[in-house]
Image (cartoon, rainbow, N blue to C red):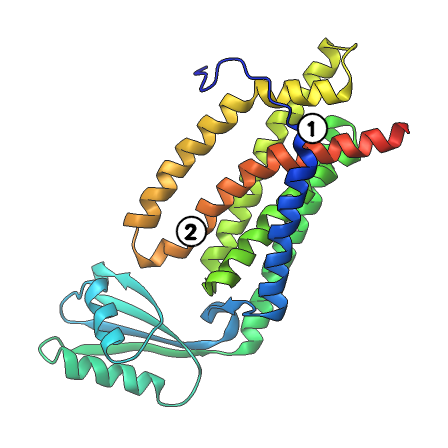
């Protein structure tokens, strides 16, 4: 395997209180932004809105549609169906006249390219609330499954709990970032958060697995030494994996377009915070728990 670092001997466990403090600061900023400042900016999928799908005689590039709507003071989510020459526009709000206003904009801006209204629908707040509940339960049951799996694999409930605490740490701070930046929380972002949860626990399990091996190989070492040894031995793997994923996500973020911009942002930040929490949150929690258990 490619070694990004040769042989390292960083004292990760010894610096745990510094990083616990850093994590606490990020969590407090997230709590303040979500509950006392800007709150969460829910997308149309959750807050309700209007969906208009138009089929044109000739295809219109999505960038042109975005410019046309922006020029006329309309912002929303766009989706392109180039094979059918169709454009789906999602706009917040369910007030009467939104559909007619958008249709009038295209009649005025592109009179040479007539269209047919394929559908005009309203997504009410009841449906949005249902989607919020479904997203919450998806995250909750994934956490339960992870605790059960890790506890069974490593024969210790605290290992599973530590992994899930690290995931909650990652997901909550990522949501906090979206609140601070006032970015929309939509279905794509929820998918990114679930992907982040899987990435984070995978990274954590790699280190836990090395810890389990080292416990058998170095029976005379203290838990402090075993954790530091395990994290140092897997450090190259963690850095290389994170960097390769980051390169892909940077490409998506800068060149993927508006449709997946928020999805890429959530994963981009999530991979960074997930790699951080694997080393500086999950494993130190195991150490703190085991240390207190033997006192």
Is residue 221 or residue 113 the one in the foreground?
Answer: 221
Q: CA distance from mark 2 to mark 1?
A: 32 Å
Depth order, front residue of 2/279: 279
Between disc 2 and disc 1, the foreground one is 1
**Quadrant of the snapshot with the C terminus:** top right
Q: Nearer the viewer, residue 175 or 36?
A: 36
Which residue is at a point 37% across and 54% down the rendered structure image? 260
**Picture coordinates of residue 141, whole percent (x, y):** 67, 50
> Residue 62's image quarter?
bottom left
Q: Secondary structure at mark 1?
A: helix
Residue visible at 68% across and 31% down? 283
Question: Which SS class for mark 2?
Answer: helix
Q: Nearer the viewer, residue 60 or 225?
A: 225
Q: Are marks 2 and 1 in contact (CB under 8 Å)?
A: no
Name which residue lies at 44% across and 45% down. Answer: 268
Quarter of the image holding residue 29? Answer: bottom right
Q: Which residue is mark 2?
A: 265
How dense is the environment of label 1, judged by Cα within 10 Å: few (below 14), some, or many (20 and up)? few
Q: How many marks?
A: 2
Point out which mark residue 14 bears: 1
Where does residue 64 sit, x and y in percent of width and height? 19, 67
Location of residue 155 in the rendering, given as x and y in whole percent from the top left corner: 78, 27
Give the side of residue 82 with respect to residue 219, left or right: left
Q: Position of residue 75 (x, y in %)?
A: 34, 74
Mark sitting earlier along the chain (2/1) = 1
Residue 105 seen by the camera: yes
């Amino acid at each position: 395997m490619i070694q990004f670092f040769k042989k390292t001997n960083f004292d990760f466990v010894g610096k745990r209180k510094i990083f616990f403090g850093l994590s606490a600061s990020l969590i407090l900023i997230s709590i303040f932004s979500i509950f006392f400042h800007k709150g969460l900016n829910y997308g149309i999928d959750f807050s309700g809105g209007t969906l208009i799908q138009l089929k044109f005689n000739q295809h219109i590039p999505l960038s042109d549609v975005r410019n046309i709507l922006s020029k006329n003071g309309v912002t929303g989510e766009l989706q392109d169906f180039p094979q059918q020459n169709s454009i789906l526009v999602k706009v917040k709000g369910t007030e009467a006249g939104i559909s007619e206003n958008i249709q009038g904009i295209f009649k005025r801006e592109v009179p040479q390219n007539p269209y047919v209204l394929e559908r005009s629908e309203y997504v009410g707040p009841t449906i949005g609330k249902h989607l919020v509940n479904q997203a919450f339960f998806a995250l909750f049951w994934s956490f339960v499954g992870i605790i059960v799996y890790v506890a069974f694999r490593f024969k210790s409930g605290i290992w599973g709990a530590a992994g899930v605490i690290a995931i909650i740490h990652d997901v909550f701070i990522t949501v906090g970032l979206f609140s601070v930046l006032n970015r929309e929380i939509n279905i794509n972002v929820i998918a990114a958060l679930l992907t982040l949860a899987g990435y984070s626990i995978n990274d954590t399990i790699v280190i836990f697995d090395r810890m389990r091996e080292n416990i058998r190989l170095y029976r005379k070492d203290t838990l402090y030494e075993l954790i530091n040894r395990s994290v140092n031995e897997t450090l190259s793997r963690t850095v290389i994996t994170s960097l390769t994923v980051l390169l892909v996500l940077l490409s998506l973020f800068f060149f993927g377009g508006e449709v997946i911009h928020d999805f890429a942002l959530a994963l981009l930040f999530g991979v960074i915070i997930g790699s951080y929490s694997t080393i500086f949150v999950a494993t130190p929690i195991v150490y703190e728990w085991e240390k207190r258990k033997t006192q």
